[in-house]
Amino acid sequence: MDLKETAETTGHTWWNVPAQKWALFLSDREEQVFLILTLLIGALVGLCVVAFILVTERFGARLYPPGGAAWRRLLVPVIGSLAVGYLLYRFFPDARGSGVPQTKAALYARGGRITLRTVFGKFLCTSATLASGLPLGREGPAVQVGAGIASVLGRKLGLRPDKVKALIPVGAAAAIAAAFNTPLAAVLFALEEVVGDMHAPVLGSVVLASATSWAMLRLLLGNDPLFQVPQYQLVHPGELGIYGVLGVAGGFVSVAFTKLLLWMRGRFLRFPRKTVWFQPVAGGLTVGIMGWFVPQLLGVGYKHVGDVLNGKMALKLMILLLMLKLISVAASYASGNAGGIFGPSLFLGAMLGGIVGTVAQHFLPGYVASPGAYALVGMGTAFAGIIRAPMTSVVMIFEITRDYAVIVPLMISSLVSFFISARFQKQPIYEVLAHQDGIHLPTAETRQQGGQRRVVQAMRDATEVWNGSLTVQEALEKSQSSRFHAWPVSDERGVIGVVSLQSLQQAVGNGAPDKRLYELVDPTDFAHVHADHSLHLALDRMGGSGLDLLPVVNRADIHQLEGVVTLQDVLALYGVGPKESHAASEDKH
């Protein structure tokens, strides 16, 4: 018996020695490990993006061979979207959509966690989607793949959760650097859009990963820019006014695209869950029918963007592609296919710029540059209006052209577009997309409220949660033995709202004692807070809703109840509430 115990102890110790040594080494050398990991992430993400490009192009070439039959343009998008829809529904539910909102959700709502299954599913499903001819982009999905690789490596190596989260923008920057061949714009995008802080402490690692990934792309595929662009020149200072007009047009096109996509996606989300697996076919069918008549619509269309930049496309075709692309991209994305909106935004901007440039050159031939120059600026204009990253758009187009002369027109047009887009579409597209999925990303204001007291300090366990099937009369009877004046309501999804004693009494007064509680609440829009919200925001929402109790819900799932916060708990935390409430709150936290 003693020998057996000794053997077990020895085996157990031998098994844990490497892990123990690594944990000890990591505690002493975490910064050095983080630095080496940054270089490794940059290299791996660069390899993945190169593979992404090659797989998509070669698979697409097999599905659409030169001189292929017209039926391919109709059937391939439909069959491809059907297959991808099933894969997304059955195996990779987190790989749906663009990838940028999911990356931000991982950073702010899921503790930096992106699974290896999601990384593989995103790569596979997006490759199949793009090869099938759907007009979505690869850059957004590459961001999620890059961030996922960083997350998996960080967690496998046993880094602290805050370090794993810090790797998310590192992987995202590496992906953009390789996908666009623009390392500086990749750094700006990771800070401006993913982190939301241009002074983030992770800046050094983001720069290092971006440079490493770009070097890997250059080593494997050469240093060819994304687009071959002729030399730009400003023919007359009065052109700056035309670029301002382009900014106005770009702003309104950005708003139209954003609103259409969000409206269509909202409609698809209302369909029964059992239809999710074949919803993407709606996008595939839309693209197939349009592609039957206009083959240039298929795919992300970078080749046709190159034609516009070099003045090789007719005005009527540009107008047609602008309208059809706007509708087909919105339908493809909203129906649930895997793919991003980076590439489509550049396509829309190039077509719009080409249209404005062609018209301007027609009326002012001696004072206006070639339409290709306007198409180039239009790309940054649409990107700034749709993605809401104006600094990234300016630097990205500058890196693509490597021509400083484009900066001033680009800044004017992009900022005008950004202003108009923000004026008519208050919330950025990625925030609304996440919100539609029940993920509430923190705003810039929320992130900056660093030193304030938080809801998590005052929240308590939700001990009284009422089922939505209760009638108003039954709820009133239950309220007599409750210490609260408002209660969370739930169904099979989780929390769906809050009912107050006053609303119950009002329902009885209106002659509806048999009404169910779920009929009194709106599951898509109810008063709530998150654990990282400031207490003053909780008080504002209590005042606005007339409730003295709010549910505390998870950022990644609005229906996941984490606790409740009451007015008495908030006051007790500040020392002005009843002694017993304050004590209870302190015991919990």
Image (cartoon, grey):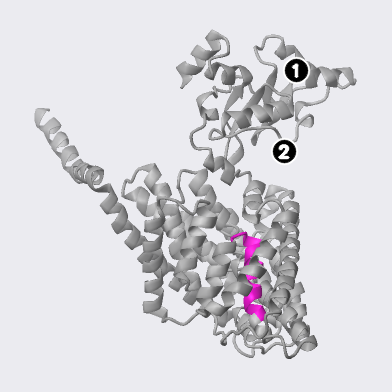
Stretch of the chain drawn in magenta: 374-389
Point out the image quarter for the N terminus.
top left
x 81%, y 17%: residue: 505
**160 and 6: which one is in front?**
160
Asked if the residue at tag 1 contacts the one at tag 2, i.e. Cβ–Cβ closer than 8 Å, the answer is no
Q: Is residue 457 above or below residue 560?
A: above
Amino acid on which disc 2 is placed: Asp
x 23%, y 48%: residue: 29
Estimate how packed mark 1 is, as few (under 14), some (14 to 19) or many (20 or more) residues with alpha carbons within 10 Å.
some
Can residue 468 be seen? no
| Residue 381 covered by magenta stretch | yes
x 70%, y 16%: residue: 485
**236 and 340: which one is in front?**
236
Give the quarter of the image for residue 386: bottom right
Q: Which residue is mark 1?
A: 501
x 64%, y 82%: residue: 373
**How far across and down, in percent of the image, does residue 511 sit?**
90, 20
In this rendering, position of residue 33 left or right of residue 68: left
Q: Main secondary structure of the magenta part?
A: helix
**29 and 553: which one is in front?**
29
| Residue 124 covered by magenta stretch | no
Q: Which residue is mark 2?
A: 525
Amino acid on which disc 1 is placed: Leu
